[in-house]
Amino acid sequence: MEKKFGLSSFVLHILAMGFMLLDHIYWSGLVDLTWFTCVGRLAFPIFAFMIAEGFHHTKNRKKYMLRLLIFAVITELPFNLVAGGSLFYIQHQNVLWTFLLSVILLCIYEKIKQNKNTVFKVFAYPIITLAILVIAVLAMTDYNATGVITVALFHFTRTDEKTASRKRVFCCIVQLLVLCSLNVIVTGTPKYSVDICGAYFSIQSFAIFALPIIWLYNGKQGYYNKFIKWSYYLFYPVHCLVLGILSLVF
């Protein structure tokens, strides 16, 4: 059944960009408010979800990957200003590299799926997955292996208006369990925690609150034109550049 209400792709992008902006304002040192980065944790799961949706809807996956590659390169220096306070910061690479690796992995999955050799599939899936995850870790991309897994999660649990209600509920439960595992157990650390009413919560654990927003997605594109399309990509390097310059000045 088609949803009569909900959030379009356009709205999800705007929300994710707003959350990311708050997060980067905090990490650039311009504002020392922890809640900025707590709210900012919601950005990545939403973007990861949209990458999985983009992979499904794009008419040309090679061009899709090329755009991610180009903007990953463009964003690197501005991102370095925010993440490391200098133009060169090899310890951390921007999240578009993570998304590029994720899309490459999904493309390879589809190639493997087309192969009729069952034995090949049994070995190919885990080997290729491990290889991409190791690359993400060694390259120190933002969210590294957990980021790639998150995109893959949304790809394999993707539903639409034709999906049966039971399967939708099952997919939502899987998303919740996996995101909790990744953001609370795997990457949640006491070093980065916030005190709420005497109880300490990992900052990264706030990422799971992105799920209710994602579940409101109605499958619609919403407002869309070439300007909006390129704004999605340009927002990342432009806001990083502005915040990076401001952090150096102030």
Image (tube, rainbow, N blue to C red):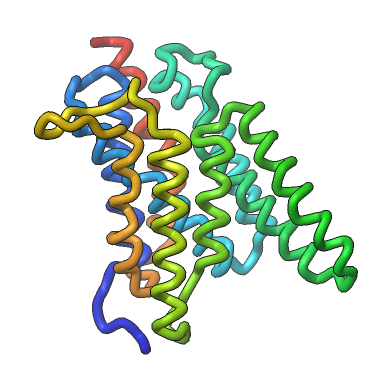
Residue 35 lies left or right of residue 52; in this view the side is left
Q: Quadrant of residue 192?
A: top left
Q: Residue furthest left?
A: 197
Q: Quadrant of residue 38?
A: top left
- The structure residue drawn at horizontal position 30% and vertical position 68%, both measured from the top left corner, is 216
Residue 34 is situated, as x and y percent measured from the top left of the image, at 21, 27
Give the number of marks: 0
- The structure residue drawn at horizontal position 37% and vertical position 89%, both measured from the top left corner, is 1
Q: Quadrant of residue 101?
A: top right
Asked whether residue 112 appears in the rendered view, the answer is yes
Q: Toward the viewer: 193 or 244?
A: 193
- The structure residue drawn at horizontal position 37% and vertical position 64%, both measured from the top left corner, is 9
Residue 49 is situated, as x and y percent measured from the top left of the image, at 45, 57
- The structure residue drawn at horizontal position 39% and vertical position 22%, both measured from the top left corner, is 82
Q: Is residue 81 above or below residue 117?
A: above
Residue 6 lies left or right of residue 148; in this view the side is left
Q: Toward the viewer: 50 or 150?
A: 150
Residue 234 is situated, as x and y percent measured from the top left of the image, at 43, 42
Residue 87 is situated, as x and y percent measured from the top left of the image, at 49, 15
Q: Quadrant of the C terminus?
A: top left
Q: Is residue 235 above or below residue 159?
A: above
